[in-house]
Every structure is written in C-alpha cells, then in structure tokens.
Image: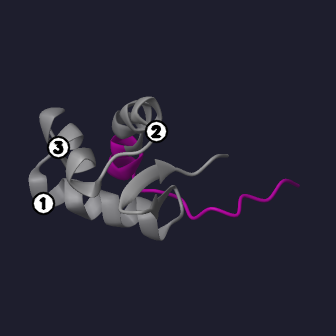
C-alpha cells in the first residue's frame, strides 16, 4: 500500500496551491508578497491568502529559499 508522507491540505489550500504553482514555477520562485498578490488577484481574501501560504509551507507543499517560495517537487 503506497504511503503519502504529506499531510492533506484543506480544499481551499489546494485551490491556492493550484493558483500559485504555475506563476512560481515560471518565475523560478516568488517572494511571499508576490505569491499573496497572485492569490488576491485571483479572488482570495488577503487574510486567507496569508493563512494558505502558511499552511502550504508548514505542510511541505512549498519551501522557502532566500526569501523566495518554491513548490516542493513531488
């Protein structure tokens, strides 16, 4: 039976990841502020965007290097 080492995301955090994944990959990293702007431009509330970025970071879906966010490879 395959094991998923990642903690499941909330549905809204999954939507947030799908929204920022391509812009992060295209730019080879975004600052947290840039990622939050991408989310708010797509209709996420600013407070929620910050919460979702925290969730994505804490659960390992995103990682930060030199103040830039990157999507963790699967």
Number of callouts in the render?
3
Quickly name the residue at label 2: 28
Q: Quadrant of the N terminus?
A: bottom right
- In the rendered structure, does residue 68 fall within the stretch colored magenta? no
Does residue 38 lie above or below 35 as drawn? above
Q: Nearer the viewer, mark 1 or mark 2?
A: 2
Q: Which region of the structure is painted magenta? A: 1-16
> For the residue labelled by badge 3, is the local secondary structure a helix, a strand or a loop?
helix
The residues bearing labels 3 and 2 have C-alpha atoms spaced at a distance of 16 Å
Side (left or right) of 47 relative to 26: left
Mark 1 sits on what residue? Answer: 47
**Callout 2 secondary element:** loop
- Counting from the top left corner in percent of width and height, residue 72 is at 57, 51
Mark 3 or mark 2: whose residue is earlier in sequence: 2
Closest to the observer: 52 or 10? Answer: 52
The residue lying at 79 percent from left, 59 percent from top is 3
- List x then y, in percent, for residue 50: 22, 60
Mark closer to the chain start, 1 or 2 = 2
Binning the other alpha carbons within 10 Å of mark 1 as few (below 14), some (14 to 19) or many (20 upward) gives few
Which residue does the image show at 46% across and 56% down from the upper left?
9
């Amino acid at each position: 039976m395959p094991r998923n080492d990642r903690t499941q995301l909330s549905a809204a955090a999954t939507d947030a990841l799908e929204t920022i994944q391509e812009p992060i990959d295209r730019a080879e990293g975004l600052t947290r502020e840039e990622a939050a702007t991408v989310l708010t431009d797509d209709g996420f509330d600013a407070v929620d965007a910050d919460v979702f970025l925290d969730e994505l970071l804490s659960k390992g879906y995103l990682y930060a290097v030199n103040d830039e966010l990157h999507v963790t490879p699967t």
